[in-house]
Amino acid sequence: LAPDVVLADVPDHLQLDLSSFSLEQSAEHLLGEGGFGSVYRALYGGDQVAVKIFNKHISQTHPHRLMRQELAVLSRSRHPSLVSLLAVGLRPRVLVMELAPRGSLAGVMEREGELHRTLKHRIALHVAHGLRFLHASMIIYRDLKPDNVLLFTLQPNAAVIAKIADYGIARHCCTMGMVSPDGTPGYRAPEVVKGGVMYDQQADVYAFGLLLYDLLTGGRRIVEGLRYPHEFDELASSGKLPDPVTYYGCSPWPDVQELIAACLQPEPQHRPAASQHSRKACSNGSLLDRVCNKETSSASNMVCYVVYEGLHSSHTVLPSDETTAGVELCCLDLTGKVLHREVLPDQRVLSLCSAEVNKRQWVLAGTRSGRVWVVSAAPERSRHSLHCLSEPVTALIFVAAYQNASAVLAGTANGTLAVFVVNSLETPGCVVNTVHGVGSPGRPVTCLTVAPSAPLDRTVWGACGTQLFALSNNLQVAKVIETTPMGRRGAVPGSSVACMAVGKQVFTATEGTSRLQVWDMRTDWGHGAIDCAPLLSENDGLSREQYGRDGQAAHVQSLLVQRNTALWVGTSGGVLLLLDALSRQPLLVTQRLHGPLRHLLPAQSSSGTPPSTLYVRSCGCRGDKDRGVLSVWDANLPHHARNLQNHLAVRQDLEAKMLNGTFME
């Protein structure tokens, strides 16, 4: 290359102004050294900058060519996730770039230790955005590692947190890919390590999986790699890394672990593209707040769950499951540990609730035979049954205030509601206090819930067939709402209400539909409907037809209103939908999970803050190998989802301005 024309095509605003440039090549100002040069802290235009100097003795390649290769990428890469080029000079041979105040990700993990989960998510998100941009520009980065990810702040809500730096071996490539085995040992894909094998941008995806692994484990793999460099590269390129939770003792992060496994697939075609894992990091708030997954039973026909304050744990889950000897109640904490099991000599359990009697915690189980079993939550596991009802017990709920006492309401398959006074629950064979007819005979009571914000004459809400009913504080029927539309000849036949949730409004879903109906609990008027199928197809990338006939995978299975502001919706297809309860706009749509989300329940964490929200999903098919799964989520998910939406909006605006050249550094 002729030195006089090396920078002939560089725009004037990127030509180095030596009068504004101050560089001192000393150990005090040295930021790092790489394969092709050294990086120093310097001053340019009165601002601190990072300056890369290409030293001739470091590489056999001529420094002019090295500078041109990196300049070819830097000068065209205007993106909030890529380090910006400020100036380029030939004498001296330098690239002037923006300075990251926090240094590299590797250095931050070494100094700070464990980073906050939200910050880890934002770093991964920004790096994914950068890779997506590079790959769309037909550039293979080839050297993704914590040392080459620079951090500008540790504030998770900042628009710019992490940027990819050092494009020394990044190359524009054709659709055929590349062959040269470049990269850093410990961060190379299997096809790169082999050498002589064509590879493409999917090699960067493999390195991204390794970067996620280091984020998850706090960089502890890097420390081990310094002691055992050969094993470091071999384990990384083979994808046989130790389990981050059991080996390093880090907190479980299910969705990130799944994304890591997907990125580290040995065959490049089986890895997600950069655009896919970028989208997953953007849209999937489970990357933020899903705490853990636990298999809860060897069978798949779990019917119902209850959460109560147990003696062993402040959040104990009790699922019911059929066995050959009767029905089993399995008591476990939210770590998945089984505390004890109880087999009831009865038919299938249809409903569960918990109640406190004389400072003792009890679990009540309503069965198909009409019995209500009362099982102690204490280790002695005493049990007895109450007066047997004439119909299956399809719903149970504990009500704290009933005529200056507490009561348990038992809804039956025949549209009646039996009231048991709590103080007598410890007595075997306890008789029913009163019985109310709340629906049409032959229609089961499917839902019972306490309304936290309801007026006194609408304390308890329930559903029976196609009707909603509200009970006053003395448990008398105060209101009945028919949910089916009215025609000229009366109510149009419709499906029964399958699930409901009550906040400032009442949300209901009927059997076999993706639509939610919204009701005003004070006026009893319908306030419109929410169709979940379009929301899922817009966010999950699947058409309505791909959700099955009539969108059956979008059918609503469970509902939960949290703090009157967020509505959780579980679907048949295993997708969790989170909506703003007031605006009804989607906050989050998760990726598909293993099976129908049949239950959504709140639970208090053992530390007391913050409360965890858990949802339960259970495999839809039956068989010995099927297992129900309990997933636990942080209750702050709605807040984090809103923050993520705002963050993405700011990032998209910034990206557009940089691409259009209207953003000033």
Image: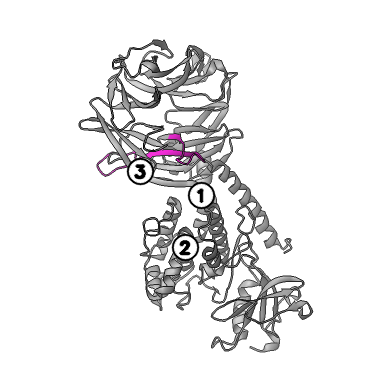
- Whether tag 3 and tag 1 are in contact, CB under 8 A, the answer is no
Which of pointers 3 and 2 lies earlier in the amino acid sequence? 2
Can residue 443 be seen by looking at this rendering?
Answer: no
The image position of residue 474, as x and y in percent, is 49, 12
Which of pointers 3 and 1 lies earlier in the amino acid sequence? 1
Q: CA distance from mark 3 to mark 1?
A: 20 Å
The image position of residue 617, as x and y in percent, is 39, 39
Binning the other alpha carbons within 10 Å of mark 1 as few (below 14), some (14 to 19) or many (20 upward) gives many
Q: Is residue 372 above or below residue 273?
A: above
Q: Is residue 621 magenta?
A: yes
Residue at which label 1 appears: 288
The image position of residue 348, as x and y in percent, is 28, 27
Can residue 428 be seen by looking at this rendering?
Answer: yes
Q: Say left or right for 122 vs 198.
A: right
Residue at which label 3 appears: 336
Q: Which of the pair 318/71 is nearer the observer? A: 318
Q: Which of the pair 410/176 is nearer the observer? A: 410
Residue at which label 2 appears: 214
Binning the other alpha carbons within 10 Å of mark 3 as few (below 14), some (14 to 19) or many (20 upward) gives some
- Whether tag 1 and tag 2 are in contact, CB under 8 A, the answer is no
Q: Which residues are magenta?
A: 600-629
Residue lying at the far right in this picture: please name it: 19
Which amino acid is tagged 3? Gly
Q: Is residue 546 above or below residue 122?
A: above
Q: Quadrant of the N terminus?
A: bottom right
Which of pointers 1 and 2 lies earlier in the amino acid sequence? 2
Q: CA distance from mark 1 to mark 2?
A: 17 Å
The image position of residue 412, as x and y in percent, is 36, 18
Q: How is the image coloured?
A: one colour
Residue lying at the far front in this picture: please name it: 359
Q: Is residue 58 above or below residue 380?
A: below
